[in-house]
Image: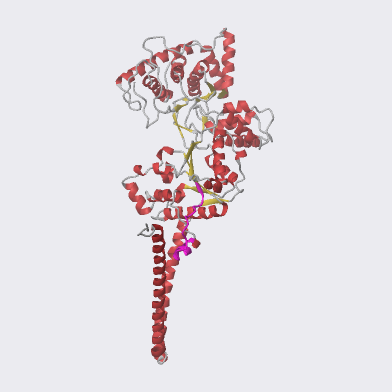
């Protein structure tokens, strides 16, 4: 039986043919109309203007002059605005061609796990064609998150160099502009050039540093922020982020001149082949990024680049030491172990590089051509504490008071610390401790990721040791406790809120302490003060010896303090180094830990100051001689 209807495929071919015939006839008709108009105008000019050319000449010249002036003004405005927007739309980026970075995976040290993930990216970028033939789709991007100085941009350069593809380095704030739409233009021009590079080299990497500057969550932008962004382009509002989202995951289109020409004649029918542009972003604040930016298809991989471990620090240190002249007896294990901040975090690769370079500077100014361990230690002290200088105009009595204050901290550290140690005892001022009359620096012996109950009690005793020393040896009290008391209070509150006191119920872990919590923390601090006061009373000869040496030299290393304590211990016949019990012996004992990220405190002479991490990594301290104006002590 014959089918009465034609096949749908044949119908589709006929419709396509009809469409092409109609398009051709419309083009022929337009051409015919154009020729008729031109012919008519030519005949009018021939029969009307030419016979009376002399009479019409002034009018023709005047009309031509007006047209020329008008066209000149229009072209001048077009060129002016075109040049302006072209200049404003230029993205301040750095294009690095394959092989120009000079860094490879052999130069990336300290994080072998991250290197393994990076090698997968290189494999994909090298074999884009084969991967697509398998039916796969090459990943669009990778986000690198982590603390500053961990080598995120350095890793991106290594990936580009290993893959042999062009590398574009762009700073996210450079996309913002004063005028609306300019930021969008910058993003479009950047990715347009990246796609051209990708067609030529097979792939291209666009690295956007500090991407949180333009990729913050849109739900957090409201009111004035949205209006300012929409009017003047400050941050781009949501328009800049929307443009970035579209460029990172665009529809499959081919906008080349050849494709546009073929489309005019209806000859291009195959699927557009999108070039492989791999977008890499780096941020320290991944939590503020928009969810649309983090979804698969844009940033498919999200990698956290952490600080290197002990073995990683040794690897990085060995890499940089190989580039300088140094004595052969520098112990990598010792230096890498000491490369731990007072907060218990290991140095980042950038910090290690700085320390090695600072050691070279110190040796050079000292007139030597080789770096020693002493230079490395001096460089680490400069990194952590800043440059030191003597305090002028201080009376001998004030100097003695500060010395006893600091000696109390030092004795508690020497006797009680397990995973930390006394690093330096000083009566000098350091750059990171502006206004400090004296400081007892402590340092972690190993990376500390969690604090025990006993360590919290030791911290409380160490903070309160200065007050005990003032009462025992000076017979009075000073304002040097302006930072110690708040620090001990926060530790005690942390102890209570983490359930170490036997009280488990806490309504608001981060809020203001309740009356019961204050009372519990006060009882704990009173009990720990009695313990540390007893410790100092049993070590009076040692403290007198420390103060005598400190007043004379104005600064003692931790090893020197330990030698003094050991010498006096032998003289008085003591062999037990740890005197005070670390745990409470009464029913009223209430240990604590700080519920929020523990503020770092230095044990300073005239007043203690809270340290909060700066953007550069070094702690920011308040004056130790006077209490902070904007942070009153915790009331007990």
Quarter of the figure with the C terminus: top left
Seen from the viewer's position, the closer of residues 47 and 61 is 47
Residue at x 37%, y 53% (from the top left corner): 232
Task: Locate residue 271, reporting x and y percent.
Answer: 47, 55
Task: Locate residue 64, reporting x and y percent.
Answer: 42, 81
Asked if residue 506 can be seen in this view, the reply is yes
Residue at x 62%, y 26% (from the top left corner): 333
Task: Locate residue 567, reporting x and y percent.
Answer: 59, 13
Residue at x 33%, y 22% (from the top left corner): 506
Q: Residue furthest bottom?
A: 51
Q: Which residue lies furthest to the top in this view?
A: 573
Asked whether 411 falls inside the magenta stretch, the response is no
Asked whether 265 falls inside the magenta stretch, the response is yes
Task: Locate residue 405, reporting x and y percent.
Answer: 47, 20
Q: What stretch is highlighted in magenta?
A: 259-278
Quarter of the figure with the N terminus: bottom left
Seen from the viewer's position, the closer of residues 502 and 256 is 256
Is 157 situated left or right of 5 in this image? Answer: right
Q: In this view, does 206 lie above or below 608?
A: below
The dominant secondary structure in magenta is loop
Seen from the viewer's position, the closer of residues 209 and 601 is 209
Which of the 4 image quadrants contains residue 357? top right
Q: In this view, does 10 lie above or below 282?
A: below
Total numbered badges shown on the rendered structure: 0
What is the basis of the colouring in this image?
Answer: secondary structure
């Amino acid at each position: 039986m014959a089918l009465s209807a034609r096949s749908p495929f044949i119908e589709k071919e006929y419709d396509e043919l009809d469409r092409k015939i109609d398009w051709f006839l419309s083009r022929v008709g337009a051409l015919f109309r154009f020729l008729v108009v031109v012919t008519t105008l030519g005949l009018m000019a021939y029969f009307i203007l030419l016979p009376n050319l002399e009479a019409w000449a002034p009018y023709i010249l005047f009309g031509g002059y007006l047209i020329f002036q008008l066209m000149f003004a229009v072209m001048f405005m077009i060129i002016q605005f075109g040049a302006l927007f072209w200049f404003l739309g230029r993205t301040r980026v750095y294009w690095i061609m394959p092989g120009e970075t000079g860094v490879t995976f052999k130069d990336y040290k300290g994080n072998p796990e991250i290197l393994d993930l990076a090698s997968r990216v290189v494999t994909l970028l090298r074999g884009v064609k084969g991967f697509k033939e398998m039916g796969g789709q090459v990943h669009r991007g990778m986000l690198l998150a982590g603390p500053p100085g961990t080598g995120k941009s350095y890793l991106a350069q290594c990936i580009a160099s290993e893959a042999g593809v062009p590398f574009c380095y762009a700073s996210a704030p450079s996309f913002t502009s004063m005028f609306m739409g300019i930021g969008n233009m910058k993003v479009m021009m950047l990715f347009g050039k990246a796609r051209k590079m990708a067609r030529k080299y097979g792939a291209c990497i666009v690295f956007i540093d500090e991407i949180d500057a333009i990729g913050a969550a849109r739900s957090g932008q409201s009111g004035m922020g949205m209006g300012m962004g929409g009017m003047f382009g400050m941050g781009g509002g949501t328009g800049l982020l929307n443009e970035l989202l579209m460029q990172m995951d665009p529809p499959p289109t081919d906008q080349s001149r050849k494709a546009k020409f073929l489309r005019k004649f209806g000859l291009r029918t195959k699927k557009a082949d999108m070039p492989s542009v791999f977008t890499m972003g780096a941020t320290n604040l991944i939590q503020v990024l928009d969810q649309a930016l983090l979804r698969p298809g844009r940033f498919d991989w999200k990698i956290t680049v952490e600080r290197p471990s002990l073995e990683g620090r040794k690897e990085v240190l060995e890499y940089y030491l190989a580039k300088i002249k140094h004595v052969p007896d520098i112990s990598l294990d010792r230096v890498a172990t000491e490369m731990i901040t007072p907060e218990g975090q290991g140095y980042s690769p950038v910090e290690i590089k700085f320390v090695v370079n600072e050691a070279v500077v110190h040796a050079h100014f000292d007139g030597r051509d080789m770096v020693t361990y002493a230079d490395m230690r001096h460089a680490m002290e400069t990194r952590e504490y800043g440059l030191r200088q003597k305090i002028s105009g201080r009376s001998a009595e004030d100097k003695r008071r500060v010395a006893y204050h600091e000696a109390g901290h030092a004795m508690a550290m020497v006797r009680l610390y397990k995973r930390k140690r006394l690093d330096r005892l000083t009566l000098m001022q350091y750059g990171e401790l502006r206004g400090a009359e004296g400081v007892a620096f402590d340092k972690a012996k190993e990376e500390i990721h969690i604090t025990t109950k006993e360590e919290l009690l030791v911290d409380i005793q160490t903070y309160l040791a200065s007050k005990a020393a003032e009462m025992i040896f000076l017979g009075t009290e000073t304002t040097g406790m302006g930072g110690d008391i708040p620090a001990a209070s926060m530790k005690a509150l942390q102890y209570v809120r983490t359930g170490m006191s036997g009280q488990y119920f806490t309504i608001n872990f981060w809020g203001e302490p309740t009356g019961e919590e204050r009372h519990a923390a006060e009882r704990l601090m009173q009990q720990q003060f009695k313990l540390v006061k007893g410790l100092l009373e049993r070590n009076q000869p040692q403290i007198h010896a420390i103060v005598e040496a400190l007043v004379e030299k104005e600064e003692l290393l931790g090893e020197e303090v330990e030698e003094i304590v050991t010498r006096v211990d032998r003289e008085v016949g003591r062999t037990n180094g740890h005197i005070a019990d670390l745990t409470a012996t009464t029913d009223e004992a209430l240990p604590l830990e700080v519920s929020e990220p523990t503020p770092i405190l230095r044990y300073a002479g005239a007043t203690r100051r809270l340290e909060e991490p700066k953007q550069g990594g070094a702690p920011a301290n308040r004056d130790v001689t006077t209490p902070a104006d904007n942070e009153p002590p915790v009331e007990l």
